[in-house]
Structures are given as C-alpha cells and as structure tokens.
C-alpha cells in the first residue's frame, strides 16, 4: 500500500470585487491620431510679432481765397490741395493762419 502525501493548503486569497460601472468615474479623452506629417521638429520656438502698419496723419484745414484767412474757399483740405485750388492762405484746425 502506498501512502498519500499530506497536502498543506496554501493561504486563502480573497477575490477582489470591482466597483460597478455606474459608480466608477471615467475620463474619456479622444487620443489624437499620429501621422508622419504631424511629427516634425519645430524650427523655432519664438513667437512671431506682427508688423504694425505705418499710418500717417493727414493734416487738414480750411482754405481761404484772400490773405489773412478771409473768404472761405473749401474746408477739410490739405495745404497742397489748397495751393492747387488757388487759395492764398490756409489755416489748420486749432492753428494759426499760414500764407501760401
């Protein structure tokens, strides 16, 4: 007769119960697809500064037909436009009279 070797039972490992899917918080994020075109080394990390447009203020005034700023020819005109019209004097807005 052969004798059986006695078995020693190992420690009992409890089963882990997962929480229900309703109570579990999920973070759902869409992972971006990676393509060879999108994986390119960046050449410069400097922020580009947009160039400002240079704008000149056009000084306008009133054109007069006589010297000493008398006899209005036209308003809101530049000095050169006044000279072309045939004005004798020109005055800036809030300025002094200038003889052309």
Image: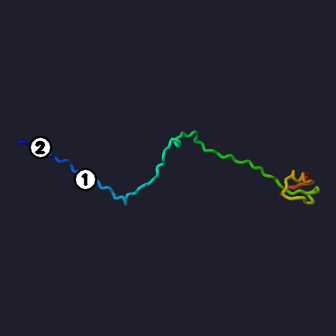
Label for residue 14? 1
| Relative image position of residue 73 (x, y in whole percent) | 90, 58
How many other residues sit within 10 Å of disc 1, few (<14), some (14-19) or many (≥20)?
Answer: few
Taking depth in this image into account, of 11 and 85 the one nearest to the observer is 85
Can you identify the residue that label 2 sits on? Answer: 5
Determine whether label 2 and label 1 are within 8 Å by CB.
no
Q: Is residue 43 left or right of residue 23?
A: right
| Relative image position of residue 47 (x, y in whole percent) | 61, 44
The quarter of the picture where residue 67 lies is bottom right
| Relative image position of residue 27 (x, y in whole percent) | 43, 54
Q: CA distance from mark 2 to mark 1?
A: 27 Å
The answer to whether any part of residue 65 appears in the image is yes
Q: What's the residue at 53%, 40% (across, down)? A: 40
Q: Is residue 39 left or right of residue 20?
A: right
Q: Residue furthest right?
A: 66
Which of the two marks, 2 or 1, is nearer to us in this view?
2
Q: Is residue 51 left or right of residue 61?
A: left
């Amino acid at each position: 007769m052969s004798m059986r070797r006695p078995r020693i039972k190992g420690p009992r490992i409890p089963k882990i119960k997962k929480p229900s899917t309703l109570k579990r918080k999920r973070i759902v994020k869409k992972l971006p697809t990676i393509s060879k075109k999108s994986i390119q080394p960046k050449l410069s990390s400097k922020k580009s500064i947009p160039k400002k447009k240079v704008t000149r203020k056009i000084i306008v005034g009133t054109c007069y037909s006589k010297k000493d700023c008398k006899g209005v020819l036209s308003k809101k005109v530049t000095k050169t436009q006044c000279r072309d019209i045939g004005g004798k004097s020109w005055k800036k807005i809030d300025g002094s009279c200038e003889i052309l």
